[in-house]
């Protein structure tokens, strides 16, 4: 299938699982911010789970179908319409040549995903199709979607079976979330009060949120001495606190190293909650142990397999 | 000075582990970090996905389906210990790459400032800057950006008060007593004293960046003619890096 970009939306990129093995070269991992919506979107069009999809931010844009095919829209609710008629999310949609797909402002959540049957056909650069803006690679010419771009999918056999995600698996995007974290690695850079502030206060997502990081506002987290460290590696979801005491959550396009102390890191499974938060939404943090986080992660992957089996049994 | 040769293990989320050898910038600590990185990379450890060396620690990304924190820690501890007992901590490749630089003029607009700030002539700044080999302590901040150590304090200079909106890739700069090379076009506040025609980041190459942590770099002043010639050779892919 082929989509012509009529209006590119606010910030639309092509993303997949992201880049591995290049962070030691200073190259960010990139990849989808909301793994769950990503995997489900691929399932719904019969793709492998790691095909490249479109990630749309806050405002979706307009696309004209110039070669028919199937899509599925997941993630934030941008009131998707085809030819001005509302269409459902979280299920397979068949689009025909000439159809116009429109996605507006996100009512719930922040980022929507569109999978194309066959997966988006762009070259693999350094092991991934993900757009990495700062490195000018991946996606279409290493940049965000532009008016006039054509997003094509790989050729695929006849239309995949249509299916719909059962309602109990559709996430609700709340305006107030609790994100579970592992404390550290620089927890000892903060006073006892600073850690207490971090774990008991609510923080607000500012307008300064993007694929590199989300800046939060709220109570100031107290350092023991300084808001600087000798730079070290920055894992995904790391929550760093610069001198001003306001936390910054690092995401997939973050710099690979950083010089602010990290009070905690969000667990892998909860990064999608951060990805779906809009400016003005609030978040609190809850500390858990690493073994607990691993159990949650394994349950998450188990759930993904369960959903795939459920969808397969419906569609055959 | 008292130093922790044995690393501290600090969880960094549920997929990474920080292996920390200290919290300062020192060649000894950095050698230990890079030494352990090489040794870990030589082990067959499928549970390790990626290792990022920094000034004073390794960030080890692991697959939680293949290991747990305690097993991984113990394994790294064992490897680190046996490495230290065989006194093999600093056996890393010591190669020095010559980086040609066109100093001053339009490519190095802040050379005059750095000279004046330190009561030196421009030539003396060039002489001092290009006389020693700098260690690449780590790569970070941007694709292929090397954090270099070992610059003489005689040519130290403060950052610009207002950063430039665009500094071209290849620009060689000074910030405080650090020197570095911009690897991509980027905004920045370093004092720019010259530019190299070398491409520190090229996604079409494998590896996509010129330098790795542990390499050494020596700057070599060149003329505009040589600079143009090197650019041509790079475009034709006939340029060979000079390692000494």
Image (cartoon, coloured by chain):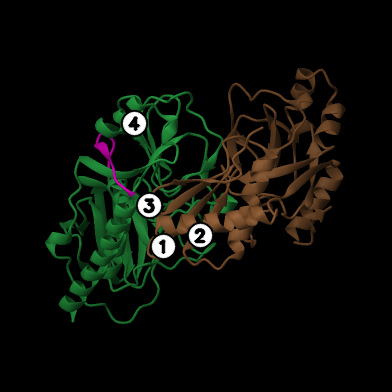
Chain colours: A green, B brown
Measure the alpha-carbon separation of dots 4 and 3.
19 Å
Q: Marks 2 and 1: which is nearer the front?
A: 2
Relative to the observer, which residue lies in front, A59 or A171? A171
Query: Mark 4 and 1 residues: CB-CB less than 8 Å, in contact?
Result: no
Measure the alpha-carbon separation of dots 4 and 1.
29 Å
Give the mark nearest the N terminus, 2 or 1.
Answer: 1
Q: What element carries label 4?
A: helix
Residue pointed to by mark 1: B67
Q: Mark 3 lies on which chain?
A: B
User: What number is the disc on residue A60?
Assistant: none
Measure the alpha-carbon separation of dots 2 and 4.
31 Å
Q: Is residue A242 left or right of residue A159?
A: right
Residue A9, given in percent of the width and then of the height, sits at 34, 48
Q: Give the residue displayed 52% in from the left and 35% down from the top.
A: A259
Q: Is residue A5 visible?
A: yes
Q: Give the residue displayed 63% in from the left and 34% down from the top.
A: B2
Give the extent of the magenta segment: A277-289
Let me know if marks 4 and 3 both belong to one chain: no
Residue pointed to by mark 4: A195
Q: What element carries label 2?
A: helix
Residue pointed to by mark 3: B14
In the rendered image, the residue lying farthest to the front is B85
Let me know if marks 4 and 1 both belong to one chain: no
Residue B206, given in percent of the width and then of the height, sits at 64, 62
Query: Mark 2 and 1 residues: CB-CB less than 8 Å, in contact?
Result: yes
């Amino acid at each position: 299938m082929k989509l012509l970009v009529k209006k590119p939306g606010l910030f639309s990129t092509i993303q997949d699982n992201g880049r591995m093995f290049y962070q030691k070269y200073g190259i960010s991992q990139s990849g989808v911010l909301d793994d769950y919506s990503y995997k489900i979107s691929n399932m719904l069009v019969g793709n492998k789970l790691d095909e490249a999809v479109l990630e749309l931010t806050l405002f979706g844009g307009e696309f004209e179908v110039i070669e028919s095919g199937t899509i599925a829209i997941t993630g934030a609710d941008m009131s998707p319409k085809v030819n001005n008629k509302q269409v459902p999310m979280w299920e397979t949609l068949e689009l025909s040549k000439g159809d116009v797909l429109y996605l507006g402002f996100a009512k719930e959540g922040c980022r929507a995903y569109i999978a194309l049957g066959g997966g988006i056909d762009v070259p693999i650069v350094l092991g991934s199709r993900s757009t990495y803006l700062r490195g000018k690679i991946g996606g279409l010419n290493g940049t965000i979607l532009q008016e006039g771009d054509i997003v094509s999918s790989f050729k695929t056999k006849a239309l995949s079976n249509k299916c719909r995600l059962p309602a109990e698996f559709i996430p609700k995007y709340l305006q107030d979330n609790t994100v579970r974290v592992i404390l550290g690695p620089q927890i000892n850079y903060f006073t006892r009060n600073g850690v207490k502030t971090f774990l008991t206060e609510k923080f607000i997502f500012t307008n300064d949120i993007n694929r590199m990081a989300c800046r939060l506002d709220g109570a100031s987290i107290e350092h023991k001495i300084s808001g600087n460290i000798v730079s070290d590696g920055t894992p995904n979801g790391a929550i760093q606190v610069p001198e001003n005491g306001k936390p910054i959550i690092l995401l997939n396009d973050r710099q690979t190293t950083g010089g602010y102390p990290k009070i905690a890191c969000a667990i892998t499974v909860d990064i999608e909650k951060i990805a779906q938060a809009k400016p003005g939404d609030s978040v609190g943090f809850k500390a858990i142990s690493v073994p607990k986080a691993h159990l949650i992660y394994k349950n998450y992957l188990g759930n993904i397999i369960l959903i795939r089996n459920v969808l397969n049994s419906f569609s055959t | 000075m008292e130093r922790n040769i044995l690393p501290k293990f600090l969880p960094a989320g549920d997929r990474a582990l920080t292996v920390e050898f200290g919290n300062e910038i020192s060649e000894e600590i950095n050698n230990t970090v890079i030494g352990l990185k090489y040794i870990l990379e030589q082990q067959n450890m499928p549970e390790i996905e990626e290792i990022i060396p920094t000034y004073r620690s390794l960030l080890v990304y692991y697959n939680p389906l293949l290991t747990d924190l305690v097993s991984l820690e113990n394994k790294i501890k064992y490897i680190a210990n046996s490495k230290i007992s065989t006194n093999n901590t600093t056996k890393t490749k010591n190669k020095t790459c010559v980086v040609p630089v066109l100093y001053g003029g339009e490519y190095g607009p802040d050379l005059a400032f750095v000279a004046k700030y330190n009561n030196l002539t421009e030539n003396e700044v060039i002489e001092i800057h290009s006389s020693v080999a700098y260690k690449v302590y780590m790569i970070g901040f941007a694709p292929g950006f090397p954090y270099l150590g070992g610059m003489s304090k005689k040519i130290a200079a403060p950052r610009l008060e207002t950063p430039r909106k665009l500094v071209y890739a290849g620009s060689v700069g000074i910030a405080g007593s650090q020197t570095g090379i911009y690897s991509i076009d980027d905004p920045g506040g370093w004092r720019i004293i010259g530019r190299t025609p070398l491409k520190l980041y090229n996604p079409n190459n494998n590896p996509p960046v010129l330098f790795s942590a542990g390499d050494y770099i020596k700057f070599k002043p060149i003329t505009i003619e040589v600079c143009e010639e090197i650019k041509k050779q790079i475009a034709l892919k006939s340029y060979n890096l000079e390692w000494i």
